[in-house]
Image (tube, rainbow, N blue to C red):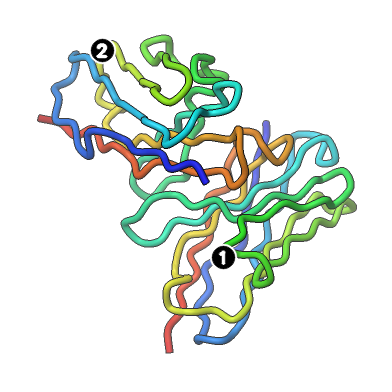
Amino acid sequence: EIVLTQSPDTLFLSPGERATLSCRASQTVSDNCLAWYQQKPGQAPRLLMYGATRGATGIPDRFSGSGSGTDFTLTITRLEPEDFAVYYCQQYGSSPLTFGGGTKVEIK
Amino acid sequence: QVQLVQSGAEVKKPGASVKVTCKASGYTFTSYGITWVRQAPGQGLEWMGWISGYNGKTNFAQKFQGRVSVTTETSTNTAYMELRSLRSDDTAVYYCARQTIPRDYADYWGQGTLVTVSS
């Protein structure tokens, strides 16, 4: 199975700053089938990005995804207060589908 | 709007089974599948399996094969996930989510169902 490693574990930033989250796969993600989800405490995950670079419906354009192959990045250009949460990457190109361990974006 | 509403929290003893319900609305149930993901307390997300809303075809993570059953009832737009032989490490929040095909992303999620396994 494809193992996804996210870094850093925790990112301490202030509102208005730029966040860069990394997701590295143990092998090539087929067809860049890579999604990003946001999860807040006590809530279900929310789809942010799919196909590595495509924004899901209703996602603000401050969120962007990039990368291909084994290295992927989620960027939040200017953090809003509601963006402080845990972010997970997921590959869905190969079965079993797998998730990274998550990156927590915390207020500095 | 698309909604997935799950059944309420459960407390089960080790060795028992649990069945979680996921009722879908706001879209054509048979045009999509349902995927099941769980999250142990304070931990990350773990994919369990997927079922087609069209023909009931399934796809499971090997870890859960033989211990999990997923079914659908198209007359009520409902999906079910049953996990058997429960252990303490099955304690988790179980989510259903809409997912078109076995290898796809999940675009709408249920609110989650906490299953606690304790003697």
User: Residue sitting at 47 percent across and 45 percent down?
Assistant: A44
Kind of residue sitting beneath label 2? Arg
Kind of residue sitting beneath label 1? Gly
Number of callouts in the render? 2
Q: Chain of mark 1?
A: B
- SS category of the residue bearing label 2: loop
Q: Chain of mark 2?
A: A
Q: Position of residue A53 (x, y in %)?
A: 49, 14
- SS category of the residue bearing label 1: loop
Q: Residues within 10 Å of mark 2 (few under 14, many from 20)?
A: some
Give the side of residue A84 with respect to residue B9, left or right: left
- Check disc 1 and report the residue beneath it: B8
User: Residue sitting at 53 percent across and 15 percent down?
Assistant: A54
Give the side of residue A93 with respect to residue A53, left or right: right
- The N terminus of chain B lies in quadrant: top right
Q: Which residue is farthest front?
A: A27
Give the side of residue B1 with respect to residue B39, left or right: right
Decide: marks 1, 2 in contact (CB < 8 A)?
no
In the depicted structure, whether residue A85 falls above or below residue A1:
above
Q: Position of residue A71 (x, y in %)?
A: 39, 23
Q: Position of residue B84 (x, y in %)?
A: 63, 77
User: Residue sitting at 62 percent across and 74 percent down?
Assistant: B18
Q: Which residue is farthest bottom?
A: B119
User: Residue sitting at 67 percent across and 40 percent down?
Assistant: B98
In the depicted structure, whether residue B109 falls above or below residue A58:
below
- The C terminus of chain B lies in quadrant: bottom left
- Check disc 2 and report the residue beneath it: A78
Which disc number belongs to residue A6? none
